[in-house]
Image (cartoon, rainbow, N blue to C red):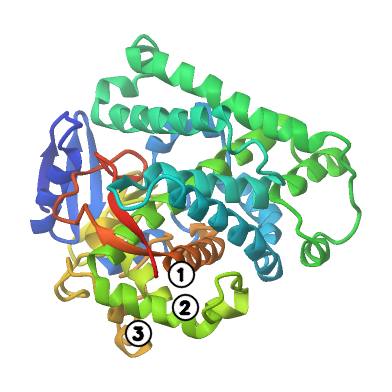
Amino acid sequence: MFQVNLPIFIEEAFVKTREWTKDAPAVAHLITGPLMFVGLKGPYEIESAIGSMKHMEKSFLYKFLNRWLGEGLLTSTGLKWQKRRKMLTPAFHFTILQQFVSTFNKEVKRFVDEIETGNLNKPTNIVPFVSNFSLATIAETSMGSSEFMHTQESIDYKNAVSRISDVFYLRFSKPWTWIQPIFDLSSLRKIERQSLETLHQFTNFIIEKRSENFKTFDENLDDMCIRKKLPLLDILINAKIKHGTINNDEIREEVDTFMFEGHDTTAMCLTYTTMLLACHKDIQEEVYQEIIHVLGPNLAQEPSHEDFTQMCLLDRCIKESLRLYPPVPTISRYTSEDINTKFGVIPEGVELLIHLYDLHRNPKFWPNPDVFDPSRHLPENCIGRHPFAYIPFSAGPRNCIGQKYAMLEIKAFFCGVLRKFRLEPVDTPDTLVMTQDVMLRSQNGVKVNFVLRN
């Protein structure tokens, strides 16, 4: 079996890992310090690992996030995960998502105004702007209010997310810090402690504000969600007060999980899709014409959920961006039993690293894999493609609970932005210095020019 040794580094980790995995087979040993992982980048092998209920437990690496996210939906396993997933699924019901479109449109307008008032016709790093946008939308739709999202506290929160994500990846690259007492004596622990104080203060404030004068409900939860915009946080608070099935700490771990996953992943997708459209003016113009065809020339006309279903090219552009730049480039699992592959048997009790970035650039399934080509996602071009060759939202039972929410939010964003601005390139895929913590990031941000349309 192909084997590489991962040295202890951080600055070039992403690039070096891509160099090694490029020539590796679909299954390869990856050795970091004293521990051996098995890396997967083939769809058949990945389906065996995540396509069923067999290997539901995540890698021990996720335990590095426990002080922040506890045992929320991202990190929990077994019966707790199953119960929590069932509890939270109604918050992403189709009818609820339709009602959230007005919130997306409101926050897009705020974004457009912010760009127009001070960030036109100059290189603009879009990362902080799209992060503000996505954080505000997840706060209002899932937590019930976004009034505190445009404050110094929200800036501190986003900075703390960045710092604690760095700590996570640094721990992965420094195996001696996997030993908890050693980590607790390190400078990383100090950074983690300071970040956690900011993060937990922020989410505790959200929970306390929403809990004030909270009225419980007895109605069927699915019916309640369909009838009114019921934020995810309300489901959690009601479960605590009415049924005692969740406590304060467990509410916070879910709020922390959704605030993080619901804003950072979307922000990264918005970042790279904006850059790619700026770099491909012909495709950008086609998307703009599609939006105008559906919505008309009146900028005051806000898109509806039904409108989004008619924007097929925009949908393909987003999917292609997610192929090239999956916000979470690597996921992991722990094998609960042997997995048979054509490369040999992956034994029970092994840590798996599943490389989505490399999977999505596999030339066997994606000719000219580094080229931005939305036509790959035309229905006729998807025929015969392995269903696990494209999994930006993961797949199987532990797929992303909010993937439909994210796609609607992203479409709303580009409806507002492209009707108002032309996007001109500053950074390109060739100029980006890619890195990763939990997310796939550009080391120096991503800059574009926003130019007002005539």
Horizontally, residue 222 falls left or right of residue 252, namely: right
The residue pinned by badge 1 equals: 419
* Residue appearing at x 56%, y 62% in the figure: 405
Residue farthest to the front, as pictured:
454
Q: Nearer the viewer, residue 173 or 26?
A: 173
Q: Residue at x 25, y 62 (%)?
A: 359
Secondary structure under tag 2 reads helix
Q: Tell me which amino acid carries mark 2.
A: Ile
Q: Residue sitting at 63 percent across and 65 percent down?
A: 101
| Residues tagged 1 and 2 counted as in contact (Cβ below 8 A) | yes
Residue in the picture at 55% in, 71% down: 299
- Front residue (pair 271, 106): 106
Q: Please tell me whether mark 1 or mark 3 is closer to you in this view.
A: 1
Q: Does residue 56 sit above or below 410 in this rendering?
A: above
Q: Is residue 442 above or below residue 323?
A: above
The residue singled out by tag 2 in the image is 291
Residue 430 is left or right of residue 345, and the answer is left
Instruction: State how many labels appear.
Output: 3
Q: CA distance from mark 2 to mark 3?
A: 18 Å
The CA span between labels 1 and 2 is 8 Å
Image x and y of residue 106, in percent: 62, 57
Q: Position of residue 139 (x, y in %)?
A: 63, 45
User: Neighbour class for label 1 at 10 Å: few (<14), some, many (≥20)?
Assistant: some
Tag 1: amino acid:
Arg
User: Which label was assigned to residue 204?
Assistant: none
Residue type at mark 3 is Leu
Rounded to the nearest angstrom, the CA distance separating label 1 from label 3 is: 24 Å
Q: Residue furthest top?
A: 185
Check the picture and name the quadrant holding the C terminus. bottom left
Mark 1 lies on a secondary structure that is helix
The reply, left or right, for residue 293 in relation to residue 146 is left
Query: Residue 264, percent across and down?
Result: 45, 46
